[in-house]
């Protein structure tokens, strides 16, 4: 049975997701960073996927049960995403002179009357939101193209911001939609996407069902030359009128003189044009372009296809103002979006969460090297060094499902425990303390501290593998995630 899911369903889903960040009983979302160890194409013979790609060409994560657990294995830290870090987004399309833009049409994809051909845009697409019909200008204004002067190139950048339709000297008609604020430019403007928001002044001035554009579908022939006025736009709306210019017996221009209201369909027939004075005109067909529900500019998110949600999170050094949970001693290669994780069995609420485990060590000999293997003879535990804090003698580490990183030669993953000496392949060794203490915002029981985020809690909604990102104490990483619904 032929069926579709409409773009309104996609926007509904994006709205529900966006609302989850601000509702009083909504979800709690964290951006996770992890994977300090390099990706490898080597056959590991363990519980993980054998071929992970390389640091320069990591493979796309799989979508399966494993993928829900792996990000916790090598998680370094997570930062909470707040409602101010989230916006609706649309593809960024800069205005460029010499470009022929698509126009807004209500009927892309419909079969053209009397044919089996679908109505397509100038660029050849058959859906509105794939069409190149809106632009971002150098002043960071966003405009919707209503008419492109018969599929000619745009050479005059729109600049004014009235609530009425703008006609530039190159014959284009534009509808001003909104302007990106300074905050939106700083936080939600990327190479490929930009924030979308409704301008309240534009929205208030929008007229539901007002007709702004009528296109010539077939020019006809034999008509009396001149401009023929006061022609009704028929349909389910009221008050719409237009004038039609005939030259050389052909319809050459149509101008909407009164926009009217309430149209969800409209027609102007050949007979109407004849009655208005274009005697003997035959075969002329006009397309009345119906505006979006509420009128142009009423809801920019819906009109421009805001079924993208952009998340913007910044990691500032160690996040020292938030307990210093984000290490700068190691790089990361994985980004994840975690919904409703737990911390010590309860819903996580902290701004940041440390993802690594830690040991407070005494009697240190030599040093521990980042990314080296650590072992414990009495338990058989295996781990990987993330950071060695020489000031506080704290060893931060992860335990993955890789041989030499988290499981022993028998394939078992065992927790570090007791007072055994912890040995590093680089020569570092020491004895975990037996005390309970808090050092540098890390709480230890018998010398050990677990991750602040409970493994396998919540839901992993997004995973991205990327080339390694090196961190520094004076560095800020700005991470933008764009999710399409």
Image: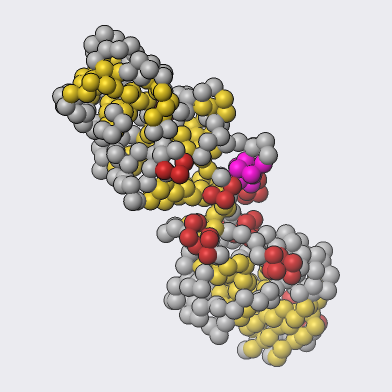
Q: Residue at x 56, y 74 (%)?
A: 148
Seen as rendered, the residue at the extreme right is: 238
Left or right: residue 200 versus residue 50 is right
Specify whether residue 41 is in view.
Answer: no
Could you tell me residue 116's position as x and y percent?
60, 56
Residue 386, above or below 140: above
Specify whether residue 201 is in view.
Answer: yes
Q: Residue at x 60, y 74 (%)?
A: 174
User: Residue 394 sits in which quadrant?
Assistant: top left
Could you tell me residue 115's position as x and y percent?
61, 59
Seen as rendered, the residue at the extreme bottom is: 226
Left or right: residue 66 versus residue 30 is left
Indicate yes or no whether the magenta region holds residue 21.
Answer: yes
Could you tell me residue 482's position as x and y percent?
49, 48
**What residue range appears in magenta?**
15-23
**Colour setting:** secondary structure
Could you tell me residue 431's position as x and y percent?
26, 17
User: Residue 210 sits in which quadrant?
Assistant: bottom right
Front residue of 297/129: it is 297
Left or right: residue 337 versus residue 418 is right
Left or right: residue 78 versus residue 383 is right
Task: Name the quarter where the N terminus is drawn.
Answer: top right
Residue 64, above or below 148: above
Q: Residue at x 54, y 49 (%)?
A: 85
């Amino acid at each position: 049975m032929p069926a579709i899911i409409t773009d309104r369903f996609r926007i509904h889903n994006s709205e529900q997701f966006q609302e989850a960040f601000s509702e009083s009983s909504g979800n709690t979302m964290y951006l996770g960073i992890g994977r300090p160890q390099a990706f490898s194409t080597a056959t590991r013979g363990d519980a993980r996927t054998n071929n992970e790609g390389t640091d320069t060409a990591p493979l796309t994560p799989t979508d399966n049960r494993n993928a829900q657990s792996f990000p916790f294995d090598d998680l370094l830290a997570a930062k909470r995403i707040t409602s101010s870090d989230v916006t609706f987004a649309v593809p960024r399309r800069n205005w460029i002179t010499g470009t022929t833009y698509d126009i807004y049409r209500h009927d892309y994809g419909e079969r053209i009357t009397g044919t089996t051909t679908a109505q397509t845009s100038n660029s050849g697409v058959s859906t509105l939101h794939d069409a190149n019909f809106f632009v971002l200008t150098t002043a960071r204004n966003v405009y919707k193209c209503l008419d492109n002067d018969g599929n000619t190139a745009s050479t005059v950048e729109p600049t004014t911001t009235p609530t009425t339709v703008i006609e530039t000297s190159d014959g284009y008609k534009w509808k001003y939609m909104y302007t990106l604020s300074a905050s939106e430019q700083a936080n939600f403007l990327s190479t490929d996407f930009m924030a979308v928001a409704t301008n309240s002044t534009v929205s208030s001035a929008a007229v539901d069902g007002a007709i702004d554009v009528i296109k010539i579908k077939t020019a006809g022939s034999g008509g009396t030359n001149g401009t023929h006025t006061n022609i009704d736009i028929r349909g389910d709306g009221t008050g719409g009128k237009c004038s039609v210019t005939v030259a050389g017996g052909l319809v050459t221009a149509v101008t909407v003189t009164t926009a009217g209201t309430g149209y969800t369909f409209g027609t102007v027939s050949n007979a109407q044009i004849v009655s208005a004075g274009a005697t003997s005109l035959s075969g002329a067909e006009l397309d009345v372009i119906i505006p979006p529900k509420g009128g142009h500019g009423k809801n920019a998110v819906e009109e421009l296809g805001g079924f993208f949600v952009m998340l913007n999170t910044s990691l500032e050094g160690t996040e020292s103002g938030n307990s210093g949970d984000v290490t700068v001693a190691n790089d990361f290669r994985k980004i994840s979006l975690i919904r409703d994780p737990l911390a010590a069995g309860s819903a996580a609420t902290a701004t940041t969460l440390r993802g690594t485990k830690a040991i407070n060590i005494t009697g240190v000999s030599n040093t521990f090297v980042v990314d080296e293997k650590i072992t414990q003879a009495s338990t058989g535990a295996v781990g990987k060094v993330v950071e060695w804090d020489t000031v506080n003698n704290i060893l931060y580490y992860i335990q993955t499902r890789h041989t030499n990183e988290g499981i022993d030669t028998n394939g078992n993953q065992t927790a570090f425990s007791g007072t055994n000496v912890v040995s590093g392949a680089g020569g570092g060794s020491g004895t975990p303390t037996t005390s309970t203490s808090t050092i540098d915002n890390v709480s230890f029981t018998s010398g050990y501290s677990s991750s602040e985020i409970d493994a396998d809690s919540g839901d992993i909604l997004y995973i991205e593998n990327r080339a390694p990102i090196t961190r520094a104490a004076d560095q800020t990483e700005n991470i933008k995630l764009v999710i399409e619904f």
